[in-house]
Amino acid sequence: MSSLIRTGIALDRELLEKFDRLIERKGYGSRSEAIRDLVRNHFVEEDVASDKVIVASLTLVYDHHQPRLSEQLIDAQHDYKGRVLATTHVHLDRRNCLEVIILKGRGTEVKRFADRLLSLRGVKHGRLVLTSPGPDSKS
C-alpha cells in the first residue's frame, strides 16, 4: 500500500501558469513532484535555521599560486574537528583549482566554516549548498 496521500490546493490562474512554466523548465514529471521538492526545501531551511545537524557541499575555485592558501585550506579542514567528510580537489588549469568539501554539522557552524574559507585571499568563487540528512539522522 502506498504512503502517498492525495490532497488538493487552490491557486490563482497566473500563479499556476508561472508554476507550470517552472515545472517544465526544470523538467519535473508532475506538479506533485515539484510541490514535494518545495516542501522538502522548506524543511531543510528550517533545519538550518534551528541549528540542527545538516550536510553541505562547499565548492571553491581558487588560485593555488596564492601564498599559503593551500596550507590555510588544509589547516581549516583539520580544525573542523572531523566534520569534513570528504574533499575532492581538481586542477582546472595551471593556476586554478576547484575543491569540493563535503561537510556535516550544525547549521551555524557549517556556515561559519564556509565563510572562513570563502573569505580567504585567493579564493575566487565559492558556493555553499545546504541540505538535511533527514529526520532520523543523529549528530
Image (tube, grey):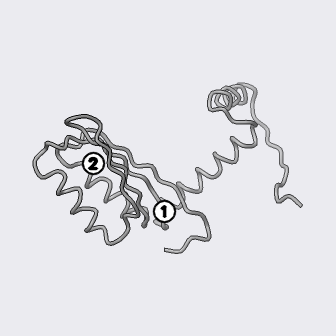
Query: Relative to the observer, which residue lies in front, 124 or 67?
Result: 67
Q: How many marks?
A: 2
Label number found at residue 118: 2
Sequence-first disc among 1 and 2: 1
- Residue matched to label 1: 54
Residue at 59% over, 51% down: 42
Q: Position of residue 56 (x, y in %)?
A: 44, 56
Label number found at residue 138: none
Residue at 76% over, 42% down: 32
**How many residues crowd around disc 2 within 10 Å: few (fewer than 14), some, or many (20 or more)?**
many
Give how far apart the Cα atoms at labels 1 and 2 are: 19 Å
Residue type at mark 1 is Ile
Left-right relation of 75 to 19 = left
Residue type at mark 2 is Leu
Residue at 25% over, 68% down: 79
Relative vertical location of residue 41 with respect to residue 11 in this rendering, above or below: below
Left-right relation of 139 to 39 = left
> In the rendered view of the protein, which quadrant contains the N terminus?
bottom right
